[in-house]
Amino acid sequence: MTQKSQKMNKALLLLCSLGLVFTASAQKTFKYAAKVGPLDTPGFYTIILWPAFIAKSKADLSDIRLMDDSGHFVPFVLTHEDDVLRSASLDSAAPYVAFPIVSMGSPTDTGTTLVVKNVSRKPVGSLEIKLKNAAVDRTVNLYGSDDLKQWYAIEENVALGKAGPADNSDYAQTLPFPPSNYHYLKLVVNDKHKAPIKFLGVGIHDVQALALNYSELAGAKFVKRDSGKTTLVTISFDDNYLVNKIVVSVKSPKFYNRNVSIYDGSKPPDELLATESLRSGDAGAMLIDIKTNKLVLEIDNEDNPPLNVDKVQLFQADRTMLAYLEAGRRYQLLTGDNKAATPNYDLKFFTDSAKNHALRITHDPVVKNELYAAPATDHANERTIIIWAAILVALLLLSLLTWKMVGEVNKRDKADA
């Protein structure tokens, strides 16, 4: 091997090393990782994202990435068919899914207002509103908004039904309207300076929620405290888990029917998420959609003895990722980058048929990403810019040198020939 050939090989080796440096930098902003594979056969796979991994992600899951063993990001689609909140159905036999309450305004000259959040942002064509029993005549206007500032009319002057002869202290009414996918919905009751009616909650009946798969959240702890006519159940976790279902087991009394207000207690003041009911004979399951490390259940006992809460379980509806994986390759999931934005892959246009045939797999336990580099200080950022500028200059010089040496070797080979 000639001296020039040796120099060219060294230059190429250095170029490859610099390439690895740039590849590593692509994943250094993610705090956590979880390995996937290798797999025996190529094809589409549905990767189940465990609660411990989702807990390390942003609330909208926009910082999740899939990377192969060569350091390149792999296209994927987060499969939202397992989302808890879906398009509304009028089937009253389906589970009731409460919409998080954003605000519940006091009565004004305009009327009592209630603003709820459509978390999934999928088209909703009806709402079921839960009300305290009242035999009064009222109408309601429904508005939609995506920013809580500009509101648009959806349906006006919808008559609210009167409470029936049932034994319950509350009742529900379904409000149908043209399908809308606004992020926020506002109900304004035309009270006309009369006493207001009391909202207990707003939601939908979700047929598809019957088929959801749930994973229990491990390590949840709860403390119960009775105070006057109210029982507070505080549930805490060691991380920000995504909670989609709460199951409360009551040991006694044998018969009960209580309203439960669910709050996000992760940061003061507590935010009201939904109002549900606990009834004897039911499974005690309440469906919500919140990423938090603390929940507070406020049980209204009225004049009844407090509930003897035996156990509280929390669950996450399975979140999954659909991706095409090669045989024999190793992959890893990355997450934990607060500045990451949702990637836009062409794969989303080609996954309809693949969803039904993809094999379901899981990932390894979540670990800290060894290549993660904490955000630098201002001075460190300046040094980092200088270092990267130097690397770019060196890369340019090496590219020119390699191009020149390749040309000289080609000329020499032609001359020898």
Image (tube, helix red, strand yellow):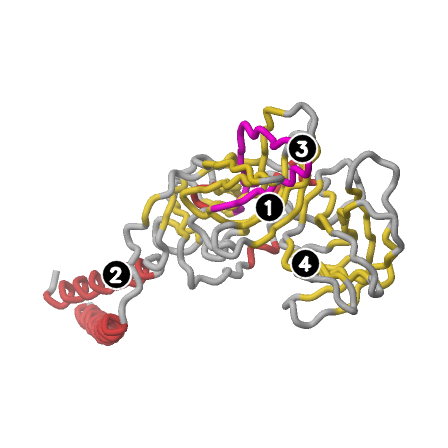
Marking on residue 262 = 1
For disc 2, the neighbor class at 10 Å (few under 14, some 14 to 19, many from 20) is few
Q: For the residues carrying marks 2 and 3, which lies nearer the camera in this image?
A: 3
Q: Is residue 301 or residue 393 the one in the foreground?
A: 301
Dot 2 or dot 4, earlier in sequence? 2
Instruction: Please check the rendered image and state whether residue 166 is part of the magenta-colored stretch, yes or no.
Output: no
Q: Which residues are magenta?
A: 294-322
Q: Which residue is mark 3?
A: 304
Dot 4 or dot 1, earlier in sequence? 4
The Cα–Cα distance between marks 1 and 2, rounded to whole angstroms, is 55 Å
Q: Quadrant of residue 183?
A: bottom right
The Cα–Cα distance between marks 4 and 1, rounded to whole angstroms, is 14 Å
Q: Which residue is mark 4?
A: 104
Tell me the kind of residue under disc 4: Met
Q: Quadrant of residue 357?
A: top right
Tell me the kind of residue under disc 2: Cys
Dot 3 or dot 4, earlier in sequence? 4
Answer above or below: position of 168 versus 410: above
* Element on which disc 1 rests: strand
Disc 4 + disc 1, Cβ < 8 Å: no
Disc 2 + disc 4, Cβ < 8 Å: no
User: Position of 296 compared to 10: left or right?
Assistant: right
Tell me the kind of residue under disc 1: Ile
